[in-house]
Amino acid sequence: MAFDSLPVELSELPGAVPAWQAQAGTADLQNICQAVKNQGGRLIALWGTDEQDRGEGYTLHLSLAKAEGLLWLRCALPVDQPKYPDLSPIFYNAHRMQRAARDLLGIDADAADRRPWLRHAAWRDSDRPLHRAHAAGKTFEAQDSEYAFVSVTGDGVHEIPVGPVHAGTIEPGHFRFSIVGEKVLRLEDRLGYTHKGIDKRFQGMPLADGAKLAGRVSGDSTVAYAWAYCMALESVAGITPPGRALMLRALMLERERIANHLGDLGYLGNDGGLGFGLAQFMRLKEDVLRLNAKLFGHRYLMDCIVPGGVACDLGQAGFEAINIECDTLMHDVRLLKDIYDDHAGLQDRFLTCGRLTPNTAGKLGVIGLAGRASGQAWDLRAQARPAPYDLLDARMKTHKNGDVAARVNLRFEEIFESLRLLHVLVERIAPGDIAAPLPATMSAGIGLGWAEGWRGESVVALESGADGRIRSCHAHDPSWQNWPALAFAVNGNIVPDFPLINKSFNLSYSGCDL
Amino acid sequence: MYQLLKQIVKVGIKTEAPPDTDDSLRVVSQRLKQEILGVFEGSLAIRHVDAGSCNGCELEIHMLSNPYYNIEALGMKFVASPRHADLLLVTGPVARNMEVALQRTYDAMPGPKLVVAVGDCGCTGGIFGESYASRGRVANVLAVDVSVPGCPPTPVALLQGILTAISSGAGERS
């Protein structure tokens, strides 16, 4: 068992991924986290829930991961003094999540950084938007807040503030560059602008409807989130989707990966000065989206994964169309890769630019695509292998250079691997049902979902109430871990390279603003 | 270079014909007189603001620039500054954390100006609705000329919405 050396009593959660849950006291939290870290594990998510309707205080939740599985750790906090020890010295990525939990619920990690994260001006420091006692539509008095960016001083140092509205069609966030000449000395990002209250919105929602909301936590990863949510719900319900449904889910997840990687490769070429790349890759991406619309009824496959299975089946003609498309893509992407590889100007922009060393990436807990480009070998499809990946032999790709070039090359390699997986899926898919029915009545319970989206892992932690509704649900985006890494990757580079470096990470704002 | 040129020639021109305007997308009669609309036609500068979307709508706005839809060939371009923009394309429910930035962007645009709300969230608040963190639909914050529903709206629907907003034959804003 992955976590059996920890000083907690584990109970296994049913479902597609190896997962356990345990209760812990605040006094043991740091020891447990340190032990998980010493064993090569990491912190995925940290969040809080209000339990005062049960006559208790708050619960602090942690999800911790090792290659073999997940641990959902819950820690009760008293209502009058909801404090717990700062976990950021052990896991760097705990820092912003602790601040977010404090903004929403008032649970306090007692960390040195007292700045808010999700709270900008829409509620006061004393308000607790996630309290269950507050009705869903309740609003709070606005409170203006100044955000204290860390300032860099010295001869010739000045700041460039950028955002929240950026120059292009991208999500909003604020970047504060401290620079000397053209060189970036420090980048500090402030996010939370797209915070739209997703955790609150989940509360009380019918369990079956939650998949739609989960599919809109970060629209570019809708398949990964919908799958993770459904996996969590199926764990609570004690059902397993039919084999055909699981194969179709994997097929959608790989198509989502291909579509996003194609788009990114186009924009990376464009940001490197090769507009040809954008035109070519966006054409290929459009072709993939059009086939999605034809086969599944939605260009981005939104709402195609439903609790119990998938919403639509494919016939033989559909599978043949996918096979033909894969062959075309394999040919065209190889050709474009040759053109990118041979383009001296482009490679000059890519190589050594925005370097995130494996050492720094490891310390920050960087994950997903950006992590794998910096030697962080985490890929759920090749490690914990939730069905149907247990049958697929997905091969993880990694690089060590951690520069823009590594993230570009990794995208190419992952496209080729996903195309190979699509062929395998089409070949192996067997006739059968595409969904298992959900039980008519659902009891209260908890379940975890974990899916390797194109950006990294999406994790959904679901608690159902006895009334067939969501008691609480928290969705976690890999961007939480990776945003701080961007700041490290940019250091020492020149300001005009920032768009290229940023695009090579392509992190989600909505996914972690929630 | 030979490979690059060969690929350009081999792929050829992919651009498709633009869609017709769609009067059903018009939520209120338009505020601009016919003669002003004449100014926009053939050259429209668009500023996009994500006011809190899930980023799904952004994906489709990006696709407007791909060779199939080729929005620039229609005389429309996305601009970096609101001061250069004729039309504001707003996605998402308006997150309260984005309300000020959205309003400032709108204020920075020179008149006459158009606002197109994009996606189910922009049109109605969508699945996120109104809450402590969300003001809901764009019309709760700015005067909206045209709303384009969809989750996300397809590039064709987006083009229709933009064309509807700038098309002549529109009445006065009521």
Image (tube, coloured by chain):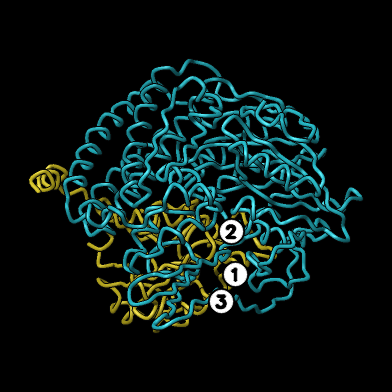
Observer-nearest of A262 and A271:
A271
**What residue did someone put label 3 on?**
B100
- Residue tagged by mark 1? B97
Q: Which of pointers 3 and 2 indicates the residue nearer the eye? A: 2
Q: Residue at x 36, y 76 (%)?
A: B85
| Element class at badge 3 | helix
Residue type at mark 3? Val
Amino acid found under the numbered disc labelled 2 = Asp
Q: Is residue B94 left or right of residue A28?
A: left
Q: Quadrant of residue A444?
A: top right
Q: Residues within 10 Å of mark 1 (few under 14, many from 20)?
A: many
Residue at numbered disc 2: A513
Image colour for chain B is yellow
Q: Position of residue B4 (x, y in %)?
A: 13, 47
Given residues A267 and A427, the one toward you in this image is A267
Q: Residue at x 28, y 79 (%)?
A: B39
Question: Foreground residue, A261 or A433?
Answer: A261
